[in-house]
Image: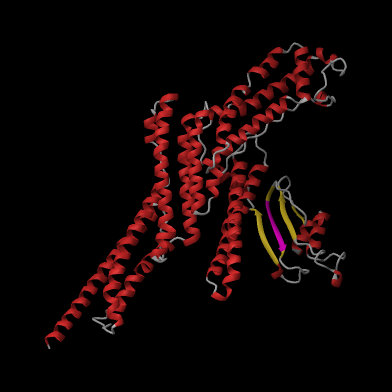
């Protein structure tokens, strides 16, 4: 900190901010200092325009090359380093790193976007990482502690668990909101601002004023070719800027996710509305009126007819009317089985409303396909949030059937039922509406990728394994438990009834302890199959030793009977 003070010798405001945070100022010192006089935070950031390092206790410039914040975690003047916590707000990124990221396609440039876009995106990403990988696991750990409380704390822990559950839900919503904000920043559609000629800009004209060039003192400019050429060049630049936005609807390909798709059309709708507002500004209307009076009709007609604004508005208004109610956000933020099921049903309820759209038609197939990816992610998230990566083979079988297999199977079966109706709708809708392109509705349906199916197949494989193991465990318990209770737990070649029971019960834990059961990648599939094979070999060995144990006991019984 004191080293930073040397850096800021040329910036008195930054010096004051550091002094205030470290409580080295004389405004509130010693015993006179109260909690109200304690400065809780200190921002440092690198200014983008000059690369200077600045500091403030109030706020920081989001258009930066990197930013951090120091927080006084106590309610006392800073005496030692343990009172200070540091968080990165915007990671420091060097120009060569940005070039590498750009080459790798990690940043999406916006049309005419300002330099603040990527800085804001980095900040949103950092905050999202804190929410997802710091706040959420912390609350999850606290929630698990509540579940393991003893009976004496049951009453209070029940209330705390409800509070923590609500907090977990809010953190998930924060995670989603930060993700959307970042995606919106990366994929933002710029708003067009129509800059008028400085002379026309200086004219005071209200929105309801009648434009009279004589009264406004502009009639002399009608014969000034230099001035008119400058104004005409301005309007031609307007047309180019507007066309950058109005060509987007016809050139748009489906976004990466359902949330991005909904956000894209909402942003485009907003951008077109803004263009209309810009065209209705008094300074814009004055510019057009001046060019018309000067008989510069080529430019004014081009502004009215060659921007493609009317066509773009027709498409965007139509699509936005359909897609704005699509429950992509509800599905993406679903954190339990009931929420996932409810969101899934809302998705299929909304899709047939595409009948009201002239332009979106069979793009609903892409929309549903993207939503199956979100569905997979939410099921995966819910399982990991509750049982980590392998807990679903560790919990008791009854709990697994009730809390895992039952709810997930309900969702998968419900999807299958609703999807069947959706396919029928698409075929009928495509037949009536007709489709453009070289694919028939049937071919389009056949080409749908349901991204959640690999997860369903993995859950089915886990269920088959758990069911088989539970049957084996039940048989072993039924056959050998009596031996254990009757004191006949004899050790045959290092193997006993109690040992057999224990080995069977612990087999899944020992085999799957280090396996991520929900990893659907090629590496995850190989690891899962290897674990199943290892389990089967282990069970085969147990069954062989168990048979030997039972034969030995049977022989012993026959000897006793004959004697």
How many numbered marks, from 0 up? 0
Quadrant showing the C terminus? bottom left
- What sort of colour scheme is used for the picture? secondary structure
Image: 48 above or below 540: above
The residue range painted magenta reads: 66-71
Q: Position of residue 54 (x, y in %)?
A: 75, 53
Is 200 part of what is drawn in magenta? no
Image: 473 above or below 50: below
Question: Residue placed at 82% from the left, 64% from the top?
Answer: 37
Residue 284 lies left or right of residue 33; in this view the side is left
Determine the image quadrant of residue 205. top right
Is 70 part of what is drawn in magenta? yes
Quick check: can you spot residue 201? yes
Question: Residue placed at 55% from the left, 40% from the top?
Answer: 260
Q: Position of residue 318 (x, y in %)?
A: 57, 28
Residue 149 lies left or right of residue 127; in this view the side is left
Residue 289 lies left or right of residue 532; in this view the side is right
Instruction: In the displayed orientation, state which residue is furthest to the front.
Output: 155
Residue 390 lies left or right of residue 108; in this view the side is left
Q: Position of residue 502 (x, y in %)?
A: 34, 75
Majority secondary structure of magenta residues? strand
Determine the image quadrant of residue 526. bottom left
Image: 143 above or below 187: below
């Amino acid at each position: 900190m004191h080293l930073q003070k040397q850096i800021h010798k040329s910036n008195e405001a930054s010096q004051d901010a550091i002094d205030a945070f470290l409580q080295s100022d004389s405004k509130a010192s010693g015993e006179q200092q109260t909690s109200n006089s304690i400065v809780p935070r200190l921002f440092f950031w690198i200014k983008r325009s000059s690369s200077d390092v600045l500091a403030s206790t109030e706020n920081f410039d989001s258009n930066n090359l990197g930013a951090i914040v120091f927080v006084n975690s106590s309610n006392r003047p800073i005496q030692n380093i343990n009172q200070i916590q540091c968080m990165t707000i915007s990671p420091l990124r060097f120009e060569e790193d940005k070039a590498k990221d750009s080459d790798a396609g990690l940043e999406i440039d916006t049309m005419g976007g300002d330099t603040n876009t990527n800085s804001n995106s980095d900040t949103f990403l950092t905050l999202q990482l804190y929410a997802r990988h710091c706040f959420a696991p912390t609350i999850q750990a606290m929630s698990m502690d509540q579940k393991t409380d003893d009976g004496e704390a049951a009453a209070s822990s029940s209330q705390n668990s409800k509070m923590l559950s609500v907090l977990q839900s809010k953190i998930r919503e924060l995670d989603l909101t930060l993700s959307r904000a970042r995606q919106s920043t990366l994929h933002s559609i710029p708003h067009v601002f129509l800059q008028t000629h400085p002379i026309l800009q200086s004219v005071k004209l209200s929105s309801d004023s009648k434009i009279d060039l004589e009264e406004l003192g502009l009639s002399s400019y009608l014969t000034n070719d230099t001035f008119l050429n400058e104004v005409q060049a301005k309007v031609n630049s307007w047309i180019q800027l507007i066309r950058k936005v109005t060509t987007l609807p016809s050139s748009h390909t489906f976004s990466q996710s359902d949330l991005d798709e909904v956000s894209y059309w909402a942003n485009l709708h907003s951008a077109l509305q803004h263009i209309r507002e810009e065209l209705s500004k008094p300074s814009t209307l004055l510019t057009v009126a001046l060019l018309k009076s000067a008989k510069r009709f080529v430019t004014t007609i081009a502004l009215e007819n060659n921007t493609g604004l009317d066509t773009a508005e027709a498409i965007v208004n139509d699509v936005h009317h359909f897609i704005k109610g699509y429950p992509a956000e509800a599905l993406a933020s679903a954190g339990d089985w009931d929420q996932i099921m409810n969101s899934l049903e809302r998705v299929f309820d909304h899709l047939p409303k595409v009948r009201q759209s002239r332009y979106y038609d069979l793009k609903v197939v892409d929309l549903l396909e993207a939503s199956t990816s979100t569905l997979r992610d939410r099921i995966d998230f819910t399982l990991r949030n509750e049982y980590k990566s392998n807990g679903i083979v560790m919990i008791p079988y009854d709990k697994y059937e009730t809390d895992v297999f039952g709810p997930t199977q309900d969702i998968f079966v419900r999807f299958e039922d609703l999807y069947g109706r959706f396919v029928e709708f698409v075929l009928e809708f495509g037949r009536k509406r007709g489709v453009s392109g070289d694919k028939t509705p049937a071919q389009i349906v056949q080409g749908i990728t349901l991204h959640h199916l690999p997860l369903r197949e993995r859950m089915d494989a886990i269920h088959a394994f758990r069911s088989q193991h539970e049957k084996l465990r039940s048989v072993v318990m039924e056959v050998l438990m009596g031996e254990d209770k009757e004191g006949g737990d004899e050790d045959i070649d290092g193997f006993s009834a109690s040992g057999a029971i224990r080995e069977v019960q612990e087999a899944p834990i020992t085999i799957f302890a280090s396996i991520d059961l929900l990893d659907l990648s090629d590496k995850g599939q190989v690891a899962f199959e290897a674990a199943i094979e290892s389990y089967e070999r282990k069970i085969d060995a147990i069954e062989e030793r168990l048979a030997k144990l039972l034969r030995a006991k049977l022989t012993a019984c026959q000897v006793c009977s004959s004697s």
